[in-house]
Amino acid sequence: MGEDDRATCAAAASPGTPGPGETLDRLSNTLRILQRRRGHRATSDDVLLAAFAAEARPDARRVLDLGTGKGTVALLLARRLPAAHIVGVEAFPESHRLAVRNAALNGLADRFDARAGDLRDPAVLADEAPFDLVTGAPPFMPPGSGILPRDPQRAAGRFELRGGIEDYAATAARHAAPDGRVVLLMDGRSRARTLAALHAAGLSVQLLTAVCPRPGRAPTYQIAVAARHRPPAPTAQVLNMRGHQGDDWSPGYRSLRARLDLD
């Protein structure tokens, strides 16, 4: 048996054993995550989405994570919302396998149900009751708008190979409870497109946050919290991740990380 075969067998035997090309990393003080060394890695967008989602519906019992990937957001929400059961939908096979292993690794397989499937396919969630909270971080680059990464996992995370914000918003609206919340994170330049997609899906934005790397810089992300009912006036705000010098987390971002038990 070759070295790769032995590593693959070890990974199958123990969910915490990295396979070939994988790393086992710290996600929070109590969570660990398996991810591909050269693939789509856990980053600040996962942290931001999980934090805003948890604040949007802290009493959520049923959560749907669209495009769950390797399970980063779902794992963070499972720890932050201890009463919640989370269903994740992921179309890329290797990412789905990692999500299943990460759920087992962290003792959350009974609360995080990672399903293989395309979120645009109604059959994937056909028998599910409505969800209190729906989350997602859609890819934001249409095919042909840039150079497609050679790694298929990274390509799927960045390019709209299986739909974009419009598909995420439509699916979220279809499965959100009447009093549920939908929280979507998009590229910082996509404010107008995000608002249009949510409006077309019959959702109204309650809170729109522009996330900037530091004061005075263009936003890296836009995070929308939406619901079926229309608020008197949606709130717009800015979150700077670092201070003016860019050498330390801002108080707002540090507080957000603390609530997820990252520091």
Image: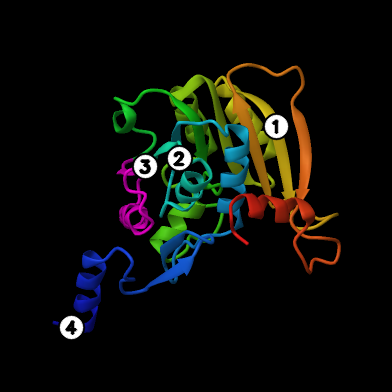
**Badge 1 is on which residue?**
207
Residue plotted at (70% across, 32% down): 207
Cα distance between the residues tagged 4 and 3 = 36 Å
Left or right: 184, with 163 as reference point = right
Dot 4 or dot 3, earlier in sequence: 4
Q: Nearer the viewer, residue 139 or 234?
A: 234
Q: Which residue was labeled with disc 3?
A: 111
Three-letter amino acid code of the residue under disc 1:
Leu
| Residue denoted by label 4 | 2
Horizontal relation, residue 49 to residue 93: left or right? right
| Image quarter (top left, top right, bottom left or bottom right) of the C terminus | bottom right
- The alpha-carbon separation of the residues under discs 4 and 1 comes to 53 Å
The amino acid at mark 4 is Gly
Amino acid type, callout 2: Asp
Earlier-in-chain disc, 2 versus 4: 4
Classify mark 4: helix, strand or loop.
Answer: loop
Callout in the foreground (1, 3): 3
Question: If you read the primary sequence from the N terminus, does the residue marked by circle 1 or circle 3 appear first?
Answer: 3
Magenta stretch: give its range: 89-117
Any magenta on residue 116? yes
Vertical position of residue 180 compared to residue 108: above or below = above
Q: Position of residue 253 (x, y in %)?
A: 72, 53
Label 3: few (<14), some (14–19) or many (≥20) C-alpha neighbours in 10 Å: some
Residue 182 lies, with reference to residue 19, above or below; the image says: above
Kindly indicate whether the residue at mark 3 contacts the one at mark 4 (C-beta within 8 angstroms).
no
Q: Is residue 120 left or right of residue 240?
A: left
User: What element does badge 2 sit on?
Assistant: strand
Residues tagged 4 and 1 counted as in contact (Cβ below 8 A): no
Question: In terms of depth relative to the viewer, which is nearer, 254 or 185?
Answer: 254
Q: Along the polypeptide, which appears first: circle 2 or circle 1?
A: 2
Label 2–label 4 contact, CB within 8 A: no
Q: Quadrant of the N terminus?
A: bottom left
